[in-house]
Amino acid sequence: MSEKSILSSAPRSFAPSRRAKTVRFAELCKRVLGFERSKEIFYHPNPDKPGPWLKSKINKSGKKVFEDDYGSFRDSLLAVEEAVRIYTLEGHSTKIVIKESYAKILDEVRRLRVELDDDSLSAVARKQLDAHPFAQRALPEDFIPSMDALPHSDYFKRFVLQNENNVEDQWVRQKKSNYNRDFISSAAVDPNGDLLFFKRDVEPVYLRTDLFHEWAHRLAAQYRNAETAFFNAVLLEQRVDGWYFPSPYALTDKGEHWAVYGECMLAPADEAAPQGALRENRKYFHEVCEASPLRAVIWMRTLHTLLKSGALRRGTMHRELVWRCMRTEKFYLQRAVEFAESYLTSEDPKAVEQAKAVLDYLLPSQAKQAEAA
Ligand SMILES: [Zn+2]
């Protein structure tokens, strides 16, 4: 087969083998196995210490200047021990933590949503739910389809659902480097690894995209050399006019580029992704591969390494993802390698370095041979 015919057959081969089916809410409820009660510390803004949180410093010209002081911000917060429920889900080791007061509100939303599923009760439930101020809020059940869509969910030990805004928002708003004075986060990662969700609504696609994004960060943390190779691929592909990037946020730093790109790599094949991207940049998985084969191959090679490692409990998407990794390699590896190799003879020493870095990752046995020679 000529190279051209291999490439033109790629998109069709990436068509989804099956469409995601919509699961009834009552069915999802059965997968919430129960909860334990416990107590945990939460941090709240201290009205007596409203900031700004600055420390002074003498600069080079001997002038006193102020800079952001995260330490004094953290110290200003009030630590309060509060009652929580810790939910266990079927098919996932991730626990979902919700303050008792919030969980009680969500109990009511759950009751109405279950009734909505029951034809004889649905008219009354619809009316009550429409009037409920928390009708749109995500329940533990709503996370299950998104978690099922992950290669595996064990990277996440806990999700914490909160009915408050992120206490760190006021710090982010203060930071000199931050341009958004109205910044409100919808999710964050706690230093202990918990994934925190603030006043989170159901929005299934956004929820799933957020999980893909955070999951991609954890994947990178396990394969640091992959993230480095990927960033060199970004720099190489950037040299081409009209290069593809998934969203302006991807340009924040190399870690974010990897994670935003991961949203595309993990998105269902029949959905244009990611949702957070520029509208005109939203692409189907195979289109992203076409637009940036080098990044696609590196990302999927890394995912494949993890999926093959056998160290994980297999998610329901395991087979489909392994298949997708193999297909990416089959259709795009040659193109990616040729693209990188074309920079080995570049006049720009940086381009040569970047090309070598990606080729070392994609063709490790050749790299070893070259070293031995
Ligand atoms: Zn991120």
Image: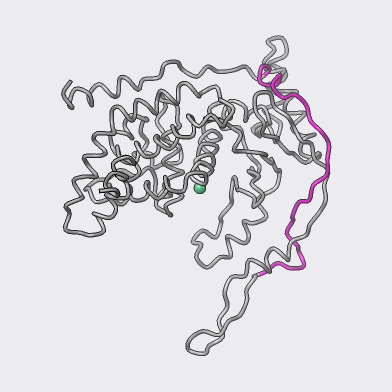
Closest to the observer, 239 or 318: 318
Where residue 138 sits in the image (x, y, percent)? 65, 33
Between 153 and 12, which is closer to the camera in this rendering?
Answer: 153
Q: In this rendering, would 287 be left or right of 151?
A: left
Quadrant in which residue 46 is drawn: bottom right
- On the image, the x and y values in percent for residue 297 come to 34, 36
In this view, the residue in front, 13 or 116, is 13
Above or below 319: residue 243? below
Is 27 colored magenta in this rendering?
yes
Instruction: Residue 36: give x, y in percent of width and height.
Output: 81, 33
User: Given the current orientation, which residue lies at the most extreme bottom position?
Assistant: 62
Residue under the point 45% across and 32% down: 266
Residue 290 located left or right of residue 66: left
The residue at 72%/17% (across/down) is 115
Residue located 62% across and 38% down the image: 156
Residue 209 vertical position relative to residue 349 in the rendered view, above or below: above
Relative placement, left or right, of 321 versus 350 is right
Q: Residue at x 16, y 52 (%)?
A: 345
| Residue 49 image-quadrant placement | bottom right
Quadrant location, the N terminus: top left
> For this view, does 289 lie left or right of residue 137?
left
Taking the magenta stretch, the answer to whether it contains residue 152 is no
- In this picture, which residue range is highlighted in magenta? 26-51
Residue 365 % position (x, y): 32, 40
In this picture, is 91 found above or below 102? above
Would you place residue 358 above or below residue 201 in this image? Answer: below
